[in-house]
Image (spheres, rainbow, N blue to C red):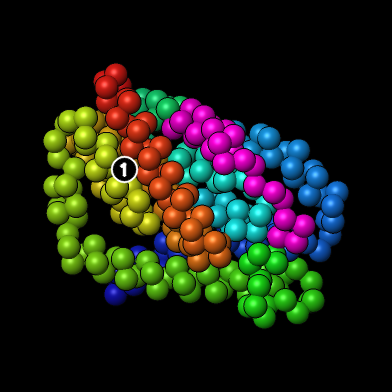
Amino acid sequence: MDLIADALLDCLKMLPFLFAAFLCMEAVEHYSGKRMNQMLEKAGHGGPVLGALLGCIPQCGFSVLASNLYAGGVITMGTLLAVFLATSDEAILLLLADPGHGGEILKLILVKVVIAVIAGYLVDLIFHRRKWTEDPMQEICHDCGCHDHHGIVRPALRHTVRIFLYLLVFTLALNILLDAVGIEQVSALLLGNTIFQPLIAALIGLIPNCAASVVLTELYLGGAISFASVVAGLCTGAGVGLLVLFRMNRDKKENFKILGLLYLIGAASGMLLQVFQM
């Protein structure tokens, strides 16, 4: 029952962000036309900066919102990755709760924002900016039968409920697995203050659950891993945003490319920080 309650609570936190994302895309489709798309494209040049700043907000709600917007063709890949890289899930709250490490919060946020902004612009430059979609919901509503021309609220609610149920099932299954394996086993994989530690931390960060950020932060507070390693793990820790991306974006090859880029950027950033002993 505790596992069910935890899964339900985690997913309920996502509801406002899920609904906001779908409502936004429905509004763009119904009321915008080409003018709105042109405005979004112009604003998109500052996307990685805005994405990195929004990602700093505790919890992974904005990673969920960004995944939906990307699946609908509203934001670029660089902006999406900027949000993912800047997101720290539960880490900021845990550091705030520890009086002795309050000063680490600003350092962690600043480092992650710099990584997110630089990586976001580089990704957009290398892989080219994603073209804005004239009909953002067409990418999501293809063959799903949800569009019934009853305004924007009802379709947005339908999508929100569907994704909520999907996240609830997956999160519950993951909670059961982590409970069976044990957090101690996960923690043991991260021991060893070497240059390769960020590689393992970044891999653990990919676990689409707040447990990953909790484990990484507690290990850092306990001195088991370095600052570079916790940065690497928290950069890849996009929370359930990755789940939403794989569920909503139909291009699976593109999803795995984003996953690979997220890991490479997080791991490389951590190793670089480890070399300079930050």
Residue 2: percent from left, percent from top = 29, 69
The relative height of residue 162 versus residue 227 in the rendered view (above or below) is below
Residue 61 appears in the figure: no
Residue 124 shown in magenta = yes
Residue 58: percent from left, percent from top = 46, 44
What's the residue at 16%, 47% (across, down)?
A: 189
Residue 209 placement: quadrant: bottom left
What's the residue at 42%, 61% (across, down)?
A: 10
The residue singled out by tag 1 in the image is 202
Region in magenta: 112-136
Prevailing SS of the magenta stretch: helix
Instruction: Check disc 1 and report its element: helix, strand or loop.
Output: helix
The relative height of residue 177 versus residue 85 in the rendered view (above or below) is below
The relative height of residue 152 versus residue 204 in the rendered view (above or below) is below
The C terminus - image quarter: top left
What's the residue at 69%, 73% (across, down)?
A: 155
Q: Is residue 176 left or right of residue 160?
A: left
**Is residue 99 or residue 150 the one in the foreground?**
150
Furthest-top residue in view? 276
Residue 3 shown in magenta = no
What's the residue at 24%, 62% (across, down)?
A: 178
Q: Is residue 113 left or right of residue 194?
A: right
Disc 1: CA contacts within 10 A as few (<14), some (14-19) or many (>=20): many
Residue 243: percent from left, percent from top = 45, 61
Disc 1 residue type (three-letter): Ala
**Is residue 218 or residue 277 the one in the foreground?**
277
Numbered label tally: 1
Residue 36 appears in the figure: yes
Residue 1: percent from left, percent from top = 29, 75
